[in-house]
Image (cartoon, rainbow, N blue to C red):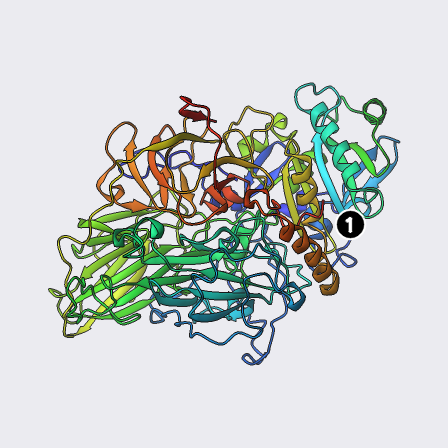
Amino acid sequence: MKRRNFFTDFASNASRPAASGGPGYYTNAVLRTQDNKEVRFYDDLIKGKHVVINFMYANCEKACPAITSNMLKVQRELKGRVGKDIFFYSITLKPEEDDPAALKEYAEMHGVKSGWTFLTGDPHDLTTIRFRIGRWNHPGFDLNVTQHTSMLRVINDSINRWTGCSALASIETIKQVITWADPMKPLEERIRENARIQARIDKMDILPTWLGSLGSDS
Amino acid sequence: MPKKRKKEQEGSKETPQTTRRDVLKMGVVAGGVTLLTSNKAFKTHDVYAQTVTGGSFVPPEPVVCSIDDFAGSPPTRPFRQQLPIPSVLQSTSLNPAPTRTAHTSAGEAPRAAHQRWSEFLPVKQYALHAKPALHRFHPDLPQSYVWAFNGEVQGPTLINNYGNPVIVRFFNDLPVNHTLGFGIPEMTIHLHNGHTPSESDGFAGDFFGPQLWKDNHYPNVLAGYDTFPTTKGDQREAQYSYWYHDHRAMFTAANTYLGLAGMYLLFDKKDSGNENDTTPGALRLPSGYGVFDIPLEFADKLICPDGTLLADPSGFIFQGDKWCINGAIQPFMPVKRRKYRFRMLNTGPERTRIHKLTGGYNFKVIATDGNLLQNPITVSQITHSVAERYDVIIDFKNARIGDKIYLLDINPDDDPQFVGFPSPTPLPSGVAIEQVNMRFDVVGDATDNSQVPSTLTSYPSTNTQIAAVKTWEFTRVDDDPNGFNFQINGLTFDANRSDHCVEKGTAEIWKLRNLVPASDWTHPVHIHFEEFRILERNGAPPPPLETGRKDVIRLPPGDEIVLFMRFREFLGRYLIHCHNMNHEDAFMMTRWDIVDTVARTPGKKEVVG
């Protein structure tokens, strides 16, 4: 039997970006947001979008609050992009406990801003999604839900690029890892940026204070 | 991806655990796993069959086959192609001419000014274009879409002499619109392990995008140049076999897997590349690039039915079931009855190889990571981690014409090769075709004026003042909320954070530890800039093949290694990282800096963590 048959695949792949795995890969499972709105995972949340996904549960006291607070800082650092061309999703690891109301309470408690959606759904679907976008570790390890709380997965479906890192990495690192999934900017723009970076390098006379990453524009 | 249960390969009797390949075949169902049993018919089709290659043709990006449906690469007949020899890159005249400071308005990536530029003015200029190309890994397969330097897999070899500084202009001609699903069209090229100023070292954060270029300045000077002004360094610091590859943070495995790697060789009066050299002191090792001095660049791939290379969307590169040398799957090489020098390089991204020869042949190892051993060491097998180089002599003089000698990889722990055909020539008993990397065919005789002196070099003293002791712990803590990451000293890579400063001109002791019980990986640790000496492995002197100068060291779980390090001539940002490229991409990498002065607390020697 083909593995694909196990997945909740409602839509055809016809409208997905050419190289994306589409609903056949990501699934089109129906999830619920903290506002109790129904959304399809690929069509409504992934397709053509640049998204940042993490896993959490409302009662998680170990790492989740630190991660949520980190992500809030990253959202600020992305200066208005979140909700516009980048979307944050937090998917519960414990759908049995986390109904939309519980997630809403969690989001409000942490002062989550717009552009950041909390999601719950059928446990089978969520496990499938977790495996699909996790892709990091050993199956035995992946089955342990508590191991997933610090993983950030970044997907830009429009260019079929994934990045990812620990949600507890530095704000600057997380921000960079998210922007590494941006489409390439036009050459003229990159040359102008490089001239600005070069001007900063030229002002530095002590080598170790060079920029850490030339891709950084902070 | 699966963790390795045991990474100490030799003599282990444990049952093999889940391999990456098993996982590849696993369909995952909520809360459990099921094996994919569908046996795919290997009907290949060549999507590029009708395209004209050559000229300015740029192949479009293919669509990678579904990893769910992938059971294995297509079968390929063994020994259907002769071992290719990567071309030698010819020097050129760059326009615009290279300059000390970055020429950003002409499209050069930003960088600090070249250090000691006027002192080491380049005498040769080279151009390497990283670009999409088509490459056929085997005559039975369609062409594969690759990213390759000047379109060649493996990349062209650069050959130069010590004392001749060069500039290599790396052009990024990778596609702006990249939707392949792995890799990124940005690059920063590292010359492993050049004595290279930081701005040309391919620091992981110094990547640049398509349509831009960057000049890397390689002074080709001995480490310790400044200490011996009359001789321009201590000849015993010479390193001969290098390689260059992309080092882009988070994408090193994928970009290198796509093909961005090649070799770089240096010669000097001692290792002069001329076995007929009558100059006193010349070693007269087997010589002639591609004749009796042969690069063997190992790689492994997963190949879709249409020839497209397969990788995971996360950028994690699985171990491949097609084993390549110099870009060819299971090649053969005609050899004469004489001595050969083989420069073996493991280009990764992950596989550890254990080389062994059939017919009772041995490897006479003359250099580890490009550094001559004091005396050659004869071994029957070599454990070869990613990025290590082993220069070995194989002597076919006692062979009979018609003999076939097979180069095997007998590592039982890494994922197997898939061949799908029996060997056309009989294999020695106990040898499976799946273990065979290549075949040597003894075809005739040739004059052999080469020699392998019993003393090749001596080692510079390590008896010097130690400025500091620094410990690097390689960890992967499974029960830590942050734990799925590969870490060094509990941290992941941040290009903006330097975890250690060393003072130029000093020596330090560096301890590498892999002590966390949950960590069951062996990490091949690479330190940029200068080769180290291994003073101790677990409190004892190192084993024979670790007695020389090296730049990659295997760090199995539970081990502690004590290294002698020096930092001379140049300043700036350098890296220490696990050279399992999947691990370095998961940020098991740390920046450290060489600076003019380090403020030290008197009496405080130990710097831990």
On the picture, is A74 further left or further right than B64?
A: right
**Label 1 is found on which chain of the structure?**
A
User: In this view, which residue lies farthest toward the front?
Assistant: B230
Residue B388 picture location, percent across and down? 36, 50
Q: Which residue is mark 1?
A: A49
Kindly identify the residue that appears in the image at 64 percent across and 60 percent down. Answer: B209
Kindly identify the residue that appears in the image at 30 percent across and 59 percent down. Answer: B343
Q: Considering only vertical position in the picture, is B17 above or below B275? A: above
Residue B203 picture location, percent across and down? 53, 50
Q: Considering only vertical position in the picture, is B307 above or below A81? A: below
- Residue B135 seen in the current view: no
Residue B228 picture location, percent across and down? 30, 51
On the picture, is B91 further left or further right than B31?
A: left
Determine crowd level at label 1: few under 14, some 14-19, many 20+ residues with C-alpha closer than 10 A.
Answer: some
Kindly identify the residue that appears in the image at 47 percent across and 70 percent down. Answer: B126
In terms of image quadrants, where is residue B535? top left
